[in-house]
Every structure is written in C-alpha cells, then in structure tokens.
Image (tube, rainbow, N blue to C red):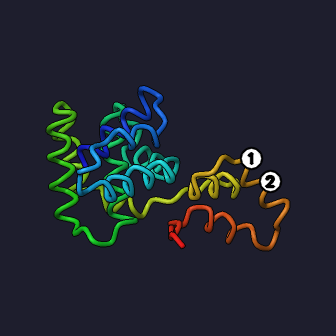
Amino acid sequence: MRNIAFDVLNDVNEKKIFVNLRLKDLDSNNCDINNITIRVYGVLQNYNFLEYKVLETTKDKKIDHKTKLILMMAIFEKMFLDNTPEYAIISEYTNLAARKNQKAKKFISYYLNNVLDEAVNAYPKFKNQEKNESIIYSMPQWIVKKIKLQYKDDYLQILESMNKKKNISLE
C-alpha cells in the first residue's frame, strides 16, 4: 500500500500527472485503495508543511526527491494517521526505502529512528507570521494574506477548516 502511494506521489510530482487520473488507473480490486488515497491526498494537502519539516530537520543536507518523499510520507503517517505504531512506521518506510531508493536506505533508517520525533515537533518560527501560517496550513502566502484581510477575527479557523479531512456521504 505505501509502495503504491509512493509511486502515485512520485508520478504526480515527476511526470506531472493529475492525481485523480493516476489514482483512477489503480486496480479497483485492490482492497487498500482507500488507504492509498488517504495517504496520497494527505501528503499533497500538507505538502508545504511536510516539506518544511523534512528540510528543517535534515539541516541543509542535499536530499533527492525520492528520499524527501519517503520522509514526508512517514511524517504524515505519524502526525495524521493515529492507527499506526511508530515501530511500524519506521519498519515500513525503511523497507520502502530499500525498494525505491537503495542509496538512501541507511540515511532514511537513521532519520526515522533518530529524527522522526523532532520532525513531527518542528514548526516554523519566522518573524513573518503570515509565512509561518502559510507553511503550517500549506497555503500560498498570498492566500493567507487575503483571508486574513477579509476575515480578521476568523481567519485561523478558516485556514484550519481548509485542511481538515472532508466527510463524504451519499444521500
């Protein structure tokens, strides 16, 4: 499941394929399609926030796209998906690294074992509050500025609501 989610995210990023079309191409008999979709859209929805966490905690190390994507997926799972124990996250993403990016396997294993908690707790501390909010809510800074201008008192609730999991129902 994580392997397929990685492939989808990688294709979306490198081949510029629309995510919904890429997900539609998946085997509909795959029982994990829901979990794959949750992971893919979750990482994309929080992309700027997750990328900040990876770049902040790797301290200017040059990391390739695949390594960054694996780390972002692991951080997303630890932060937003409650049902996975940390040891499973470490094991699964180390195994994913072995399949997708063998050169970075040791680095990814080290990161997941020693830096993952630090990454989860890393938040931007720029002097510009709008830049911080832009990263936290994975919104372009101009959108944060515009919402803040129009809804001075409620803008944080609006930004939070834009990133909440959407309930889908058929009536």
Q: Is residue 83 above or below residue 42?
A: below
Check the image and report above or below for 155 versus 113: below
Residue 91, position as x, y percentages in the image:
15, 55
User: Dots 1 and 2: beta carbons under 8 Å?
Assistant: yes
- Three-letter code, disc 2: Lys
Q: Amino acid at mark 1?
A: Trp
- The mark found on residue 142 in the picture is 1
Q: Residues within 10 Å of mark 2 (few under 14, many from 20)?
A: few
**Given the current orientation, which residue lies at the most extreme top position?**
15
- The residue closer to the viewer here, 128 or 171, is 171
Quadrant of the rendered image containing residue 34: bottom left
Is residue 69 rendered to the left or right of residue 101?
A: right
Residue 150 image position (x, y, % from top left): 85, 61
State the mark number for residue 146. Answer: 2
Q: Give the SS element for disc 1.
A: helix
Q: Give the residue drawn at x 18%, y 30%.
A: 103
Question: Tag count in the figure?
Answer: 2
Calculate the distance from the C-alpha at mark 1 to the C-alpha at mark 2: 6 Å
Q: Answer with left or right where residue 137 lies relative to residue 27.
A: right
Looking at the image, residue 165 sits to the left or right of residue 133; the answer is left
